[in-house]
Image (cartoon, rainbow, N blue to C red):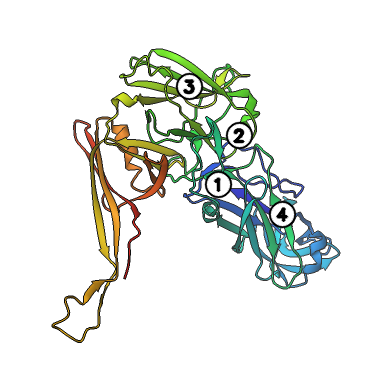
Amino acid sequence: MPTVVTTDIVKVKSQLSEVGTNTFTNINVRVVAAYNPVVIRMTRKDVLSSMIQSTWSAFFFMVDMGAESVECVVDSKIYVKASVFDGVYTVLNVTGNNVTIDAPFNAFGPYAGYFNILSRVNWYLVLRVKKGTTGSGFRDLRFYPDITGFMTCEVSGALRSFIDLDYGDEVLNTITSDLNLSNYFGFSWLEKWVGSDNEFNNSYAPTVPQKPQYIAGAFKIGDPNNGFYIKYFANTSTPDDGSPPAFMPKWLTAFEKPIYYAGLPFIKNWAQNANLGAPNQYVLIKKYFNSALNLISTDTYPFVGVGYFSGLGKIRIQDDPTVAVYPDQRRFVGLTIFKTDADKEVIDYLLCHYVPVALQNCNQFYLRWLNPLGGFDYYLFETNIFESQKVEGLGEYEDYFNSIAATTEYQNWIGKKTTEVVRVGTQVFDENVGAALKTLAASPLVSYYNTNTNVWIGVRIQPGSFQYRKTKQQYNSVELTIELPSEFNQTA
């Protein structure tokens, strides 16, 4: 009872081999944005066989239906998909495993294809979407095919249910992995129909490195990559001439050159995958430059231990060790991941602006948010910071009284809800920075950094408050209102 999986997820077509087993071909694009539609195309195929000339009547074709022939009776219906034959045919005769159908014989056969027994009333498929490599979670979805057996299964809702927007700790290690926002996933399925006890368990559990992954990202409608992380999938492929990979993947950031403010948490993310091989073959390289982009120093960090190359990669940036030499200069930090045994990079070189403490404004509001690629971005607002308070009433009540002369008040508030509101803004001349800040508006997770407690606190962007202005001189300004968590107040 093979049900064939074909899928947009992995950019492959039919997975069915001629012997009737479910197999998956090698795939090189298998990372999807979980907040985009993620479609798996499946086809019901009850029997895989060939149409040959019938021994019962030379005018028709017959099919060896194997053990399923017991479900075929004269005048029952079979859907046939075999070359030029595509439709519903009637059973004329059953002799052993051979089933003759009313498909007129021709000399161009035999025709290989699949055959569905339509007496299996209300055939349906339960698709189980599995999280991770150890089956740490799953969601079951039910789908019904059309007459041809074709099913379009949209599974992004199941993938999103696996996502936890808790970003975890930012200060433990230089190199860590996060399984809350990205993980592997696989499938299994159960075929059932009314009137039969037959159940067939099948599973798609491709071995690493062939497992597909999801990331908590969302691409725009019209995106040429169709929601696949083609630009962000780290790889080690080498052209024939031995040069570095022709396509160098990018980091999961909306900034062309992210800005790192010394003394504040700052992490960059990348799309890991098990196809990279053994972690001990890799090192993280960080290079520190002065404002003229002259190299000052280089640090390397090996991938030591286990748990790498699955989920979301997290690279924690540390303060520039040469800051004492150049305390009042803006400079740069460069990041890349290097495969030592192949002497090449596996991800594009990322250059970050570095702003020492001496050049930071004392009036600060530091934000972190989940960007559309599924990684986190950071920005420090240093000007135009206005604090206010939004107060909302929770209703009123009236006190009982029987003497007007002795009564001074009788209407009171049940309570009030107060919310601290911060209006922040910035002016930038870099159009890319302005475009990256626009991703703040729709982010599902925004936090600000409380420098007094060194803790990230979740906040909300007030709907309708985000304003982005751009001039002919490429002058970009951004303003938005942020609601801090509500205060707890006394109520009557």
What is the crowding at mark 2: few (fewer than 14 residues within 10 Å), some, or many (at least 20)? many
* Near-viewer residue (434 or 211): 434
Query: Mark 2 or mark 3: which comes first in sequence?
Result: 3
Q: Are marks 3 and 1 in contact (CB under 8 Å)?
A: no
**Badge nearest the viewer, 3 or 1:** 3
Q: Is residue 72 above or below residue 302?
A: below
Q: Are marks 2 and 1 in contact (CB under 8 Å)?
A: no
Q: Are marks 2 and 4 in contact (CB under 8 Å)?
A: no
Q: Is residue 217 above or below residue 463?
A: above
Residue 284 coordinates in the image, percent (x, y): 53, 24
The residue under label 3 is 286
Query: Mark 2 or mark 1: which comes first in sequence?
Result: 1
The residue under label 4 is 202
Query: Mark 2 or mark 4: which comes first in sequence?
Result: 4
Q: Going by the picture, which residue comes out furthest to the bottom?
A: 402
Circle 2: residue type = Tyr
Task: Tell me the element at label 4.
Answer: strand
Q: Is residue 82 visible?
A: no
The label shown at residue 308 is: 2
Among the 4 quarters of the image, the one containing residue 78: bottom right
Task: Tell me the element at label 1.
Answer: loop
